[in-house]
Amino acid sequence: MTAHPTSSSSLRRVAVAGASGRMGHMLIEAVRQSGDCQLAGALDMAGSSAIGADASAFLGAPSGVPIVSDLREGLKNAQVLIDFTRPEGTMAHLAVCRELGVQLVIGTTGFSDAQKAEIAAAAKDVAILFAPNMSVGVNVTLKLLEMAAKAMSTGYDIEIIEAHHRHKVDAPSGTALKMGEVIADALGRDLKQCAVYGREGVTGERDPSTIGFATIRGGDIVGDHTVLFAGTGERIEISHKSSSRAGYAQGSLRAVRFLADKRAGLFDMFDVLDLR
């Protein structure tokens, strides 16, 4: 990505949670390569071997920003925190960001309904962009799924198949669930009432009102999602496949830029990409 000249006063000051992880490294690299963002903080869990190290040392270009576990220390110079960690970590970050007035870009998945309600409550005080997938391509795919579901509301069985690396701890993926929600909303259904997450044994014939999910875990798959609309005599498949986390990082920076003039409110990538 080509960096464009800009004054230091116009740079968005960004902190990154999970700074020593794979996604953290991708986010830090994206921030460092951007022309309008500056790395202002780096967080990791207490006890991590990365604590105290320079956040961008892995790039061979020190940033002068140490990785810390103290949230207030890590956020003191930041305007916005990008968080792709675990629900319990994100909720701890949320409380401190709300207290300090630091905006949040949340890409973490696996939240409970109660935790989602807490995020919505915090958005009354600080601007939050919350999306299960920051990829521009995935969010365009969600829009295509909305259109497809409306056009194929009858006569088509809908199945969502997702595949991720062996280290992913939640299933189905947040992206797969979001796809299900978008489709269910377009059909006037409640995903909680029509989702089927597993099949085994004598299940009987498929209920045409259901939306099925299948989960694959293995290797280093970054993230593959396919939605199958199976009708009589034809099948339509809408797929998105990630070969790198770079798309998530670049989408996150678009989210950071979108929040620049927002004082409070809960937003998602449809807002960023004007897909409403």
Image: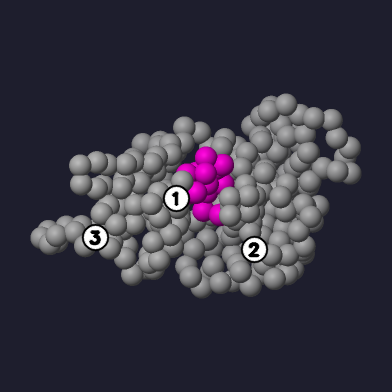
Q: Residue 149: where, in percent of width, then height?
A: 39, 53
Give the answer, above or below, for where 271 lies relative to 246: below
Q: Give the range drawn in magenta.
A: 131-143
Closer to the N terminus: mark 2 or mark 1? 1
Q: Residue 267: where, in percent of width, then height?
A: 63, 59
Residue name at image x 34 percent, y 41 percent: 237
Helix, strand or loop for disc 2:
strand
Real-space Cα separation, disc 3 to disc 2, in angstroms: 34 Å
Real-space Cα separation, disc 1 to disc 3, in angstroms: 19 Å
Q: Which of marks 1 and 3 is in front?
A: 1
Helix, strand or loop for disc 1:
helix
Q: Nearer the viewer, residue 181 or 9?
A: 181
Q: Residue 8: where, in percent of width, then height?
A: 88, 40
Closer to the N terminus: mark 3 or mark 2? 3
**Quarter the N terminus occupies:** top right
The residue that label 3 is drawn on is 208
Q: Which amino acid does label 3 sit on?
A: Pro
Q: Answer yes or no: do the residues labelled 2 and 1 have beta carbons within 8 Å?
A: no
Q: Answer yes or no: do the residues labelled 1 and 3 have beta carbons within 8 Å?
A: no
Q: Which amino acid does label 1 sit on?
A: Met
182 to the left or right of 68 = left
Q: Nearer the viewer, residue 26 or 248?
A: 248
Residue name at image x 73 percent, y 65 percent: 264
For residue 266, which numbered disc appears in the image? Answer: 2
Q: Which of 62 and 188 is in front in this view?
A: 188
